[in-house]
Image (cartoon, rainbow, N blue to C red):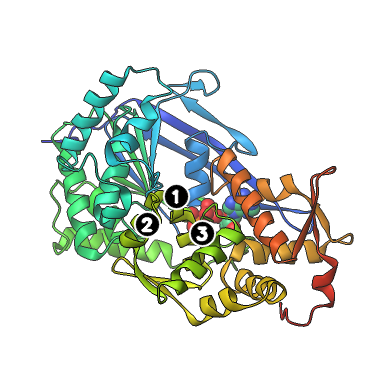
Amino acid sequence: MGYAGDRKNTPTVLEAREITKKFPTPEGGEVTVISGVSISINEGEFTSLLGPSGSGKSTFLRILAGLIPPSSGTLLYRGQPVNHLRPRTAMVFQNYALIPWLNVLENVELPLIPLGFSRREREIKALRVLDMVGLDGYETAHPRELSGGMKQRVGLARALVVDPEVLLMDEPFSNLDVLTAENLRRDLLELWNREKLHTRSIFMVTHSIEEAVFMSNRCIIFSKNPAKVIAEVEIPLPYPRDMRSKEFMKIVDRIYTLMTKPLGERRVILPEKIEMLPHARPGGIIGLLELLLERGGKVDMWDFAQDLNLEIDDIYPSIEAANLLGFLKIEEGDLIVTDKGREIAEADIIHQKILFREALIDHIPLIRQMYNLLKQTKRRELPRDFFVDLIDAYFSESESEKQIDTAISWGRFAELFGYDEETDNVFLDPSVEESKSLALS
Ligand code: ADP
Ligand code: MG
């Protein structure tokens, strides 16, 4: 059989010892999100991490992946502190995190580029894993042409292509519909149990008890505020598992009981998930709406791009931004300007700025948060890097910078923010404070 039976006393690959993580609060204090967590990830083992939303699972996973440092505690790789010798880990994200303008093959080849593989080697490896995850024939498709399930298969292929020793997954199935998630879970387990994978250890964050019991050999349970390990539960059932069997339900019940102990109040600093801002300029967004209105306000996306002699990728950021801001609906490949979209496109520049400001506050939590933080400071001013640091647990470092720069440029257009090029400080535009149109808490 697979790994389930023969994994006793297998060596530890990655060990977290007494990991604590604190984040600064806007008031200048600190909040401890993870407190003294020790766990081990063993060879040949599928471990899951369960915990309530906001308990620090993603943060802990990022620490394991070396994406962010712990505030204290150590990470050991094969018994040695992780510093120069990094374990090869790879991550699968809940929202796939694919690059929209690269095709499937290029997305999967991407992590091989910094590893120094030749073009030919990259292609061979990528084709191999694409075949493995059932995406044979989709090499030249772009992410937007794929269903959620297929996107996550690409996400999985991109992680597996580097032959990671530890595969880290952050709620990989929670954005998929029930049947798609079920298929993908089964396919991954089959790959795993047939030892087709070079990867010997999987660590999966989930908030579904059933999913944890269906997939893993061992389940670690986090409490919240701060995260501590409240239990570790062995799941000694053979694969494939039957969700309706008595043994299965018994384990689910046990974990359920462990998890429903009363938990402390939740402390929210940022929303659990930040929507990624497309890097479009306000002028481009409004220009796009004007072009769409000239064509009647409802246009097929592909015809529109062709008509303008543009690649869809060139206008896609503006399309996404207009959609996010509530100016545009996307339905079955059609772009449909909303009433708000028509209003802003037809307004004079002063009213465009006011409407844009309202849309930012209504639809973009990051900008709302930046506004609230600025308002809480005495000088109505904060360094740009303060905001970059604030979101760096959600994005890569360079993406965090781009996100903040986009947020600033949108805020500047809307006369919500100002930016001091000399000090790199973001400040609240003085006109906002007088404005009564901003009903904010
Ligand atoms: P989970 O994945 O379990 O839902 P997270 O790890 O995403 O939880 O978040 C745990 C807590 O840490 C949340 O309260 C979140 O707001 C906070 N948090 C995460 N990243 C940061 C950050 N960079 N700065 C401040 N707080 C953060
Ligand atoms: Mg999370």
Identify the residue at the far right of this view: 379
Q: Amino acid at mark 1?
A: Asp
Q: Nearer the viewer, mark 1 or mark 2?
A: 2
Image location of residue 199, percent across then percent down = 28, 30
* Residue 268 left/right relative to 244: right
Q: Amino acid at mark 3?
A: Glu
Q: Residues within 10 Å of mark 2 (few under 14, many from 20)?
A: some
Looking at mark 3, is its residue's CB closer than 8 Å to ligand 1? Answer: no
Looking at mark 1, is its residue's CB closer than 8 Å to ligand 1? Answer: no
Find disc 2 in the rendering and name its residue.
305
Q: Residues within 10 Å of mark 1 (few under 14, many from 20)?
A: few
Find disc 1 in the rendering and name its residue.
314
Find disc 3 in the rendering and name its residue.
275
Image location of residue 258, percent across then percent down = 40, 61
The tag earlier along the polypeptide, 1 or 2, is: 2
Q: Compute the Cα span from label 3 to label 2.
A: 25 Å
* Residue 95 left/right relative to 382: left
**Quadrant of the image occupied by residue 104:** top left
User: Measuring 44% from the left and 69% from the top, which residue is drawn there?
Assistant: 292
Q: Compute the Cα span from label 3 to label 1.
A: 20 Å
Nearer to the camera, 291 or 36: 291
